[in-house]
Image (tube, coloured by chain):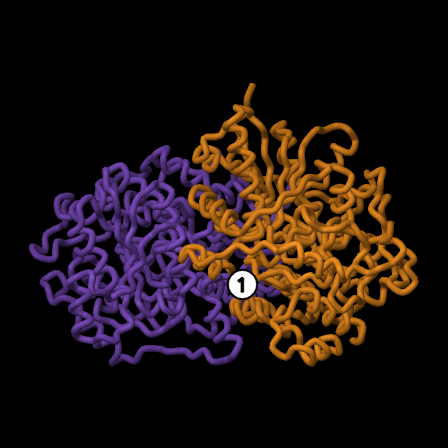
Chain colours: A orange, B purple
Amino acid sequence: MTTKIPTRLYLSEDEIPKYWYNLRADMKNKPDPLLHPGTLKPATVTDLEPVFCKEPVKQELDDTTRFIPIPEGIQEFYRAYRPAPLIRAYFLEKALGTPAEIYYKFEGTNTSGSHKLNSAGPQAFYAKEDGLTSVTTETGAGQWGTAMAMATGFYGLGLTVYMVKVSSEQKVFRKALIETYGAQLIPSPSNTTESGKAILAKDPNTGGSLGCAISEAVEKAVKTEKCRYVLGSVLNHVLLHQSIIGQEAKAAMDKYGIKPDIIIGCAGGGSNLGGLIGPFMGEKLAGKSKARFIAVEPASCPTFTRGRYAYDFGDTAKTTPLIKMMTLGSGFIPSANHAGGLRYHGMNSTLSKLYKDGFLEARAEVQTDVFDAAIKFMKVEGILPAPESSHAIKAAIDEALECKKTGEKKVILFGLSGTGYFDLSAYMEYNNKTMSDYIPSDEDLERGFASIPDIPQNRG
Amino acid sequence: MTTKIPTRLYLSEDEIPKYWYNLRADMKNKPDPLLHPGTLKPATVTDLEPVFCKEPVKQELDDTTRFIPIPEGIQEFYRAYRPAPLIRAYFLEKALGTPAEIYYKFEGTNTSGSHKLNSAGPQAFYAKEDGLTSVTTETGAGQWGTAMAMATGFYGLGLTVYMVKVSSEQKVFRKALIETYGAQLIPSPSNTTESGKAILAKDPNTGGSLGCAISEAVEKAVKTEKCRYVLGSVLNHVLLHQSIIGQEAKAAMDKYGIKPDIIIGCAGGGSNLGGLIGPFMGEKLAGKSKARFIAVEPASCPTFTRGRYAYDFGDTAKTTPLIKMMTLGSGFIPSANHAGGLRYHGMNSTLSKLYKDGFLEARAEVQTDVFDAAIKFMKVEGILPAPESSHAIKAAIDEALECKKTGEKKVILFGLSGTGYFDLSAYMEYNNKTMSDYIPSDEDLERGFASIPDIPQNRG
């Protein structure tokens, strides 16, 4: 008997997961530990607590506990906007004429417009629990900054957001939204930190970068009373919080007996991809699934497809712990690709390890192809996708068209991590045919690789 | 036994209503008929079909059929973004410390960002059924234009949108979104119509108005082959389509045995208010409910609270049929209030009749008070509301605070008709404390009233 699958597969409120899933617990080959940049020894709770909140530090270092309970105070926050819908892309399937079944988990129905809220809430909650009065963070495209502004507004905490200067000038409405939620927004680099001043001294007209904004936010946090730093991607505790995406998707699919053959996510620092694939990858690691996993990144910032697997810093000022990851080097200067959330030199260590071990595929796409796919999608599915998320759409369409060729009825799941309301200038550029595709040359990459630290762990 | 009510009350897909509810069928005192402006006789199918699509004309003139089936081709469209959530405002209740229960029906989860899509879909579907190749319309704030762009994109129809010039200049991203969906956008007044040219000849620097954009869109439709005009509010067939809002809300509340005591909607032309209150008002008219119904309008455009009940034109150029309604006169010049969707001189005839007969209350609010309420709401409920919808929030908060005084545990339902992603310049103005409140003087209103036609039906 076939049950007709609805267009939108909602879980009921009491089916929202009450545990986060820690994928590392199910990996035989664990990701390498964070290293203290001075001692080159594995980072400890003591090393990390001056910067991060207590519980996230514990979560960051825990690679053995499979399920971590979600505190009721965070479950309450999740209930304000979750469950997020899993949508059967009937209209896209029809438009493509594919025999494949396409599903997407849509994380853009909350006001911040993306999945980032799934970790912003927990991090604000833990900051409040630690007795802090404020937190600092950085934001590039603005999705994370908006999510943190919402979360700190909800829990009643102060927030300072260092926003990449060029973004804060282009995205005045993102800025307005962050400020409307009560956060303080500082274009970075700024004169409020030593690292900001140093960069401005070198180049007063710089538009800033994510790496630089991270340096400023970390510095501000450690120099402020009752304040810590929060980060929206790259680290493993962020992926842990984001596991809610994959768990909800899997719960909804399980209800209808649907097993995905291909799971696709866009990849910047890894928060969305890691969150989506978590429980499905767990089954693969346990030998219970033969699903393929595909990370999609911009050709302008090809961390997986052209990067190196090495210990590297998370920021430009080289102040963070060292992370073993796929990296283009913290000195890599990403181009002005419109997918601001994917413009980061590194990649979460768990995903990097899975990639190196052959569990995860990766591909890179140029932005005009990505926008082609976005427009095709939005005209039939009705949702305006973020440029970041549109990378996943591109790969999903390609896989569905491949099924059309072969006649295979595969089940494709992709993550639609956010909406593009604040990216309409990019769509205008696309409409006006003034969008260009930039692919870094080998020389560009070599300049980035030169910034990777020359430490024993990176040799041989 | 009390069932715990979830934060988000979703219907399942097969619970989406398959019939629209025609409130007029249950009114003993029907709204007065549309009049042909030349003959002053009730408008007929023959009068209306040169301008509108066939089925909407039938629906417009039908005040006796209670339930009208939704064609499968429109049900399919609805499934792409419905059911819309009914949300229990637990967080707002807590923040206000009220014993009242507050619910809101949230129509902003689709990309167009508002309830307007509920009628845009049907109207595009019917245009396609009539064998048309394109339709025309106007848009002020842009919600309706975006909804029509999505709907015509979905059904494969051409669309020309006349957008009030000052809006098209301020809201470049709205414009971009409409164009991304493939529609042609023309700032109004324009040189593409005689009515536009006439207005430009008088005042080349005018910023335009909704009444003027309507005139242009209607003219363009009647002069173009296989083309008709579509309208997003005011008319009764639009309210019919919007009845999906109230029916879904009622179905979700019925599941939990919840009966609203107060039902609140913002009021511009009436599409959202009429759609929300429909089935609840039907119960009141049948003597089965004692609920109160409250329309909330901007103090700058006080159609209900300071208008006259008379036959009037829907547009500035006085080309539409005459509508018996609450009106400020088609010559009334609304101020630059940020709730663009509520800046209209008239009001749907059914709602006007219900107001005159004492079934519907109305109140007017100044915009700074409305934004105060919006910010209070968004900080706890997480959703960025449209300025239009925030009028309903203001009244809901006031009623909840009244309950706090009296200790009454009333059940309040309001319509959150849309999101404010394209209204962030208004929020910026509010944040910067440069927002001002304008209330028209009695003289301003008299100037508007002078434009109401002096016909026998309006005398005595």
Q: Taking A428 as reference, is A373 above or below it?
A: above
Q: Residue at x 17, y 55 (%)?
A: B321
Could you tell me which residue is drawn at 78 percent across and 76 percent down? A224
In depth, the one of A135 and B332 nearer the eye is: A135
Sort mark 1 into few (<14), some (14-19) or many (20+) by Cα contacts within 10 Å: many
Q: Which residue is mark 1?
A: B400
Q: How many marks?
A: 1
> Against A70, is B19 above or below?
above
Left or right: where does residue A404 sit relative to residue A149?
left
Q: Who's the residue at 64% across and 37% down the image?
A: A263
The image quarter in which residue B382 lies: bottom right
Identity of the residue furthest to the left in this view: B39
Residue B41 position, x and y percent, is 10, 52
- Asked whether the viewer can see residue A454, the reply is yes
* Vertical arrangement, residue A228 with respect to residue A64, above or below: below
Query: Would residue B93 be visible to someone looking at this image?
Result: no
Query: Residue A271: x percent and y percent?
Result: 69, 51
Chain at numbered mark 1: B
Q: Position of residue B318 (x, y in %)?
A: 16, 63
Label 1 SS: helix
The image quadrant where one finds the N terminus of chain A is top right
Q: Nearer the viewer, residue A40 or B143?
A: A40
Left or right of A334, for residue B228: left
Of residues A244 and A32, which is closer to you in this image? Answer: A32
| In the image: residue A225, left or right of residue B113 | right
Q: Looking at the picture, which amino acid does disc 1 mark?
A: Ala
**Left or right of A347 in this view: B349:** left
**Horizontal and vertical percent position of residue A194:** 75, 78
